[in-house]
Amino acid sequence: MIDPAGAGFVLDDFQRRAIKHLDAGRSVLVTAPTGSGKTVVADHAVDRALAAGRRAFYTTPIKALSNQKYRDLCQRLGPQRVGLLTGDNVIAGDADVVVMTTEVLRNMLYAEAVDDRLGAVVLDEVHYLEDPYRGPVWEEVILHLPPSVVLVCLSATVSNHEQLGGWLEQVRGPTAVVVESRRPVPLTNLYAVGRRRSDAVKIVPTLLDGRPNPEGGRFDVPATTREPRGSGRSRAGGARGSGGKRAGGPRGSGGKRPGGARGSGRSRRGSGGSEHRGQRPRALWRPPRRVDLLAELEERGLLPVIWFVFSRKGCDQAAARLVRDGACFTDDAGAARIDELVEKRLGLLDPADLAALGAGRWADRLRLGIASHHAGMVPVFKEAVEQCFAEGLVKVVFATETLALGVNMPARSVVIDKPVKYDGQRTVPLSAAQFTQFTGRAGRRGIDEAGWAVALWSPDCTFEQVARLASSRSFELRSAFRPTYNMVAGLLGRMSAEAARDLMGRSFAQYQADAASVRVDLTCSFDAVAGVLRERGHLDGWTLTASGSLVSRIFHEADLAVAETLSGGLLDGLSPPELASVLSAFTYEHRSPGPRPEVWIPSGTAYRRLRRAGTALDDLHRVERSFGLDPIRPLELGFGPVAHRWAAGESFEAVQEEGFSAGDFVRNVKQVVDLARRIAAVAPDPDCAAVARQTVEALNRGVVALSGAVYEAAA
């Protein structure tokens, strides 16, 4: 057996079993908790392929993970053997080992650009199969890969692994399912509550012997109180004077403010006293104040901590409040190292851009060991936070759920601010899979003896619900596979209608429907999509027309609308700023719950093209409805002025006037860049393709270009 990627520690049983199956030539599905070492199995598959003189592809769902894995593999194998293919970076695409997003591999398969040297493919975070938009791509990859390729599927949140493994065996051949439920670092779930008119923090175990802690039930009672004078306050978990034991965790140096805080400006009062006489009764329980809970966690030696707050604004406000309370978690040496890392990351940015980004205020927080991490930040800021946290320089990070998407950033403890989150329409409880993903960040293998997950009291969720989340291991994966215009056009460009229908029947969605005896026939959906393509002139019978070929080459959520806009000449004769503003209508999504603002498109030509594209889209919607299909989403003009101004060369500071956060600005510009690259590659008109390339260059500059950079592992 090949040395398993120089693991540096004794392999666990599940790792040995998975490696044994790989050595026997089988594909594997590995489900194991976050941080348990699934990557060791993936690295072994890569090593086996290289030892046999073959290539290996490592796919991830997002660019940030691809960049991170690229750095890891460069460090392990040497940069001369590793490539990277994402929308932002093309590095040594013909290397022996190539890291890429799953969409890139899917496009390579459709373009028949995968050579017969490919020996292994790793699908990291395979639970993305259930993503409504991107999930079908994963199934397409699995179905289209050559039979000789060994597949390694990794996930922490798939409970119906036998079902998924059975499907993989059916469509890929011999496949072993390897399951590990035990965490390498044990996890303790805690529940924290605060009391009205008190700084006290009560912490209790969420589970006792795997069942809900009976003590937690009292926190669900809508009790009100006027606490008697001199009642005092209970230390967390029933410590000193409460007659009980602490909930767990090492003892620290005593009841200090977080990080040796320098005067928070508010006293820690008792809960009783004459000042409360005559007041109306109030609910007894409340969420603990963050500064108080952090003081308790620090006293117990449970830092560093990732504190999940499910809003960007909430993350920034929490970090700012902690700074105002005087918290500091670094010494002079740590602050100096943070300054060094920040300078290395931001040194290429224009000073004016740094000022517009608020880099000074952000760096000041970072220097105190406090940070935010969310999609509203530019990637270069997030990457700096990740590196500082990995080096132990930052002790408290307030993060949204984006941090749980696989970025390697484990902590000793995790706090879940509220066990509910807004799903875009309403506030709903976290799913068991989400809760497990978040708490899976707690406990660092080889560093911590245990991990700690703290859920806070919330009026939106009972203790019983939190306990069920903490104890649940049911994360059923449901296929999101459905035929899209791009998929159907791509299939009909490569195979007969009968073969394409057969492929629909081999999908995981059909496999699950058949197992549940549910009458679902994806071939009917396939025929409906083909009917729309035929009605719109992209199919002649079952043969692709020239415009149909365009549809097959545009992978995008609005694939057919983009293809028809391009084939209809609506992108011809535009300047780069005009093209940027038009393309943004296909990429931008208005997410604010408020009304859409009035938008002024700077170019009359661009505005008229958008009007024509909108009229064509209305007609497409009519045809889609006639075939019983959900219509493609409408055009969104909200980012058009920003895209136009940025492509025209205006400064970052100037375009910030439009009101987008820095992170949203970069993300939306990069989406326009990705679509412009695709237009440059497929546009029938050479002049249009040339303008699309110019548009990419005009947009991909400054903070946008830096956000796509790949840093060396040692940076």
Image (cartoon, rainbow, N blue to C red):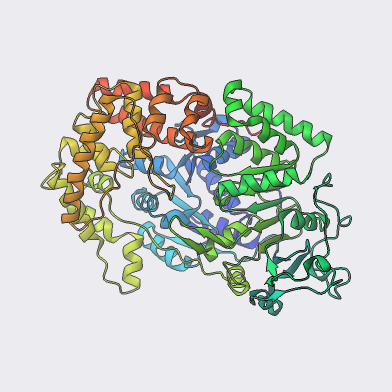
Residue 409 visible in the picture: no
Rendering coords of residue 517 (x, y %): 31, 74
Residue drawn at the location 58% of the way across and 22% of the way down: 352
Q: Nearer the viewer, residue 581 or 384?
A: 581
Rendering coords of residue 167 (x, y %): 39, 63
Q: Nearer the viewer, residue 496 or 220?
A: 220
Rendering coords of residue 281 (x, y %): 69, 72
Location of residue 384 (image quadrant): top right
Residue 63 visible in the picture: yes
Location of residue 547 (image quadrant): top left
Left or right of 373 on screen, residue 225: right
| Tally of marks | 0
Residue drawn at the location 68% of the way across and 26% of the way down: 343
Q: Is residue 672 above or below residue 404?
A: above
Q: Is residue 518 above or below residue 604?
A: below
Farthest front residue in view: 278
Q: Quadrant of the C terminus?
A: top right
Rendering coords of residue 696 (x, y %): 39, 25
Location of residue 452 (image quadrant): bottom right
Farthest bottom residue in view: 214
Residue drawn at the location 20% of the way across and 45% of the way down: 618
